[in-house]
Amino acid sequence: MASQIFRWDEAGTAGQVQAGGAMLETYTVGPPPGIAPTLVLLHEGLGCTKLWRDFPRQISADTGYGVFAYSRAGYGASDPCPLPRPLDYMTREAVAVLPELLDAVGFRDGVLIGHSDGASIAAIHAGVQRDRRVRGVVLMAPHFFTETMGIDAIAQARTAYADGDLRARLGKYHAHVDAAFRGWNDAWLDPGFEQWDIRSVLDGVSVPVLCLQGESDEYGTRAQVEVVAERAPVPVTIHMIPDCRHSPHLEAPERVRADIAAFLAGLPGGATRSEPGENDA
């Protein structure tokens, strides 16, 4: 069962919540659930709450939504996780941990925003769990299948971690830095991961989707977002962002925030505030 220690802080601060058998680092800003809808931020394969930088505060100010971010087990200041990670670790996060976590923080109504691995987790959750509280999904640089160029970039990250300054840079954000890096890197470079493919989850998505991808993304091609429009039986908007690599929200923040705000405004109900109990499922 999820812990009840979580408290929402509108001013913007770190906290903790227990879910999925681990104590997880959290960050909240803006109005809590029951007052306004919530944007749930799902970080990349080497991310954590702090690596969203000022994006949570800015997107809350732009939209009037509350924002909830958390660091998955093994990342940031969250509890460590066992290694090696199973090759279906994104699916496990989406169907086992995330539902418990959303219940624990009082999520009532809102949108999932995922980046990279977090975007894949958001898509799996939308396509498999089909949580009625989720009104839309924003996928930034998602992965649905492996590509040679992406695997090559991940192999280069292994070299940078072993021989360069990547370990030192990541160590500023992750309490268990070796576990954070190896959990992601070892899984993606496992020979068995070449067969990883989650395109089928898109067939079950039942809410609108916004895809944002950098035209120069080093981890995935345009095919990763085009497959969403091909398979998801819902309205799908794709924005390719010029002069942008793998982190649109950091490399083109104003463009990304404007795209997300427009997407939210176009959802059924827009950014309407919720009365307590109104959206309980």
Image (cartoon, rainbow, N blue to C red):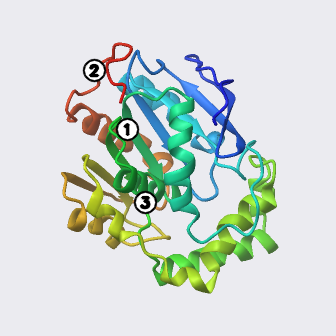
Q: Nearer the viewer, mark 3 or mark 2?
A: 2
From what the image shows, is residue 131 above or below residue 28?
below
- How far from the left and from the top, in percent, is residue 135? 30, 38
Task: Characterize the local packing of mark 2: few (<14), some (14-19) or many (20 or more) Cα atoms within 10 angstroms.
Answer: few
Residue 42 placement, left or right of 139: right
Q: Marks 1 and 2, how far apart in space? A: 13 Å
Q: Mark 2 points at which residue?
A: 272
Residue 26: quarter of image: top right
* Residue drawn at point x = 26 percent, y = 56 percent: 238
User: Which disc is residue 141 wearing?
Assistant: 3
Q: Which of marks 3 and 1 is in front?
A: 1
Q: Which of marks 3 and 1 is nearer the N terminus?
A: 1
For badge 1, the amino acid type reads Val
For badge 3, the amino acid type reads Ala
Which residue is nearer to you in this view: 50 or 190? 190
* Residue drawn at point x = 42 percent, y = 67 percent: 216
Which residue is nearer to you in this view: 256 or 124? 124
Q: Marks 3 and 1, how far apart in space? A: 17 Å
Q: Which of marks 1 and 2 is nearer the N terminus?
A: 1
From what the image shows, is residue 147 above or below residue 261?
below
Q: Name the residue under label 1.
A: 111
Kind of element beneath mark 1? strand
Kind of element beneath mark 2? loop
For badge 2, the amino acid type reads Thr
Total marks shown come to: 3
- How far from the left and from the top, in percent, is residue 101? 56, 38
Residue 103 placement, left or right of 215: right
- How far from the left and from the top, in percent, is residue 262? 25, 36
Residue 47 placement, left or right of 98: right
* Residue drawn at point x = 76 percent, y = 49 percent: 174
- How far from the left and from the top, in percent, is residue 6? 64, 25
Which image quadrant: the N terminus? Answer: top right
